[in-house]
Amino acid sequence: MGDIRSIPGASSGFSEDEDFTRFVVNIKKLTSIDLSQYKENQMRRRLTTLRMKYGYRSFDEYFAALTAEARLRNEFLDRMTINVSEFWRNPNRWQVLREKFLPQMLNQSSRLSIWSAACSTGEEPYTLAMIMDSLGALDRTSVLATDIDDGVLAKAREGIYLERSLRDVPPDFKSKYFVPEDGAFRIDGRLKKAIKFQKQNLLLDSFGSHFDLIVCRNVMIYFTEDAKHILYGKFAQALKPGGLLFVGSTEQIFSPGQYGLETADTFFYRRVN
């Protein structure tokens, strides 16, 4: 497990709050994941459960184990990147996509190719499918949804969600595309048929090309700066000239020009011709 005595503060004379605060700082240094961006109580409960699963007495001990064992790091990363997806997350940005960009794209092309990268349990690609259907263009759209985790892909294909995942879904969309079932909600079968779910490692696998729209939101924060640089370049090359990259609310690209991109709107970046 490593020598936890080498970690500052890893003695018995510190508070649980200090222990967790130090863990947040150390995890950011180790993985570039900023746990402070999440609600502390919810995040702390989740991580405490994971830590206690292996019997570590403190977050200092758990962090020492994470640095020493790849298996534990991978489980931690899986836990941190799962179950944070919601339908219509940051609704105002989806509204811009629906009312501004997608109508423009549909006027310029008879068929659209869309990719939801790191799609988690499917809320994002299903949101895209709902929007395309509402625009009368689902049959003119191919939606690819990829993730590295077989477990979340299975949940996405199943298409059953709890109420909390639907809190930002507009009421008319909720009534049209979800069927109540045993205390949860099942996604409309037409939307499931419209999406191709596929396993992919963003860092290692090659990308497709000529996408009109790539959506990769609330994912880049999990990667190092070097990895982000590589991924933004790969995303840009996977877009058609004029295609859009839609990122999350914590993932602004400060120098899009270095990737052949330009800012089209807040958190939207267009590939330069």
Image (spheres, helix red, strand yellow):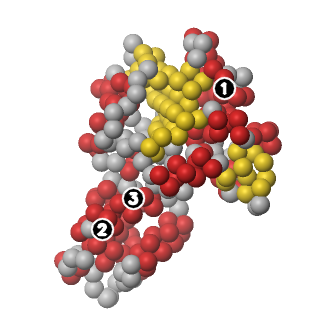
Q: Residue at x 61, y 16 (%)?
A: 106
Considering the image in quadrants, where does the N terminus appear? bottom left
| Image location (x, y in percent) of residue 263 | 44, 25
CA–CA distance between discs 2 and 1? 44 Å
- Label 1, secondary structure: give it: helix
Residue at horizontal 45 percent and vertical 52 percent from the top:
149
Q: Residue at x 50, y 69 (%)?
A: 46
Helix, strand, or loop for circle 3?
A: helix
**One can see residue 97 in this view:** yes
Dots 3, 1 in contact, CB < 8 A: no
Q: Earlier in the sequence, mark 2 or mark 1?
A: 2
First-in-chain label (3 vs 1): 3
In front of the other: label 2 or label 1?
Answer: 1
Q: Which mark is residue 138?
A: 1
The span from disc 3 to disc 1 (Cα, nearest Å) is 34 Å
Q: Which mark is residue 13?
A: none
Kind of residue at disc 2? Leu
Q: Residue under circle 2?
A: 66
The answer to whether residue 169 is left or right of residue 33 is right
Q: Quadrant of residue 74?
A: bottom left
Residue drawn where x is 67% and y is 31% of the image:
131
38 to 202, vertically: above or below: below
**Along the polypeptide, which appears first: circle 2 or circle 3?**
2
Report the amino acid beneath label 1: Leu
Disc 2 is placed on an element classified as helix
Task: Estimate how packed mark 3 is, as few (under 14), some (14 to 19) or many (20 or more) residues with alpha carbons within 10 Å.
Answer: few
Q: Is residue 8 left or right of residue 20?
A: left
Q: Which quadrant does the C terminus fall into?
A: top left
**Which residue lies under the disc numbered 3?**
77
Whole-percent x and y of residue 138?
66, 26
